[in-house]
């Protein structure tokens, strides 16, 4: 079945460590996105990528980095520079270069800094 | 700037009762509007979307939404709620030809027996 796979589902990190969240899709979608979700704040865009080897910052990119070496993969690294990384992270993809077609979301990764 | 407001943080309805979740947006041009549903600890699933045309949009799971330009609203409705509808609902607005979609803060729906 086609879809988006995020791993791991739960992740614990010590302060000062970098950690990478995986996002893989087999939908043949061009565009991929990373969102952060905090209680009562909806979803905030971290980074997005329209094509391979290209990506743009979203609204809250500080302390995060991404790569898009393959169409299927869009990993997110939460660096030690991110001051408050504990959150639920969602990856999404869409057919076109805009989210204004249907977006497909992964199941999310809950990151906790301990 | 674009924005989305969902005035109700949470709503409780009885099973079998009707439901209306409110959404107001701020956008200069004709917006692209969406409703998504999220079960606890899960990703988001698209319920329905409005791009143009008929202002009453039908979605999955028996949901519908009506676009009212004069009120800048896109309220979600369901005539009879089922216990499985308990979840968080997000309204979102996207810019035509753009890449960013702005999400509301969400409304959590509780269904009582």
Image (cartoon, rainbow, N blue to C red):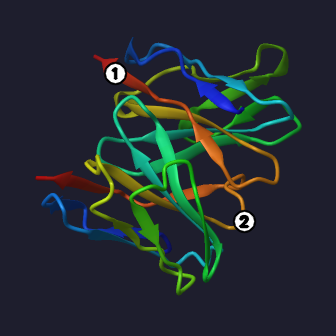
A112 or B111: which is nearer to us?
A: A112
Q: Residues within 10 Å of mark 2 (few under 14, many from 20)?
A: some
- Name the quadrant of the N terminus of chain B: top right
- Name the quadrant of the C terminus of chain B: top left
CB atoms of marks 1 and 2 within 8 Å:
no
For residue A31, which quarter of the picture?
Answer: bottom right
Does residue A87 appear left or right of residue A62 in this picture?
left
Q: Chain of mark 2?
A: A
B15 or A42: which is nearer to us?
A: A42
Q: Which residue is mark 1?
A: B110
Looking at the rendered structure, whether the residues under marks 1 and 2 are on a common chain is answered as no
Q: Is residue B104 above or below residue B99?
A: above
Task: Locate residue A98, reporting x and y percent.
Answer: 71, 59
Task: Locate residue A4, reporting x and y percent.
Answer: 45, 68
Q: Which residue is mark 2?
A: A97
Q: Secondary structure at mark 1?
A: strand
Task: Locate residue B46, reporting x and y percent.
Answer: 57, 47
């Amino acid at each position: 079945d086609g879809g988006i796979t995020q791993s791991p589902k739960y992740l614990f990190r010590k302060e000062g460590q970098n950690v990478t969240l995986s996002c893989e899709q087999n939908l043949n979608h061009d565009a991929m996105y990373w969102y952060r979700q905090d209680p009562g704040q909806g979803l905030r865009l971290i980074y997005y990528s329209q094509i391979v080897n290209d990506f743009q910052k979203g609204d809250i990119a500080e302390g995060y980095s991404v790569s898009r070496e393959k169409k299927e993969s869009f990993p997110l690294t939460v660096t030690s520079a991110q001051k408050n990384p504990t959150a639920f992270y969602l990856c999404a993809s869409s057919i076109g270069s805009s989210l204004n077609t249907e977006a497909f979301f992964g199941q999310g990764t809950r990151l906790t800094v301990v | 700037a674009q924005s989305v407001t969902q005035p109700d943080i949470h709503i409780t309805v009885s099973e079998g009762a009707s439901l209306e979740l409110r959404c107001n947006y701020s956008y200069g041009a004709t917006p692209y509007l969406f409703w998504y549903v999220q079960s606890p600890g899960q990703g988001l699933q698209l319920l329905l979307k409005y791009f143009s045309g008929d202002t009453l949009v039908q979605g999955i799971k028996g949901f519908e939404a009506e676009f009212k330009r004069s009120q800048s609203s896109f309220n979600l409705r369901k005539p009879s709620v089922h216990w499985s509808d308990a979840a968080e609902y997000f309204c979102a607005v996207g810019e035509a030809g753009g890449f960013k979609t702005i999400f509301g803060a969400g409304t959590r729906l509780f269904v009582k027996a």
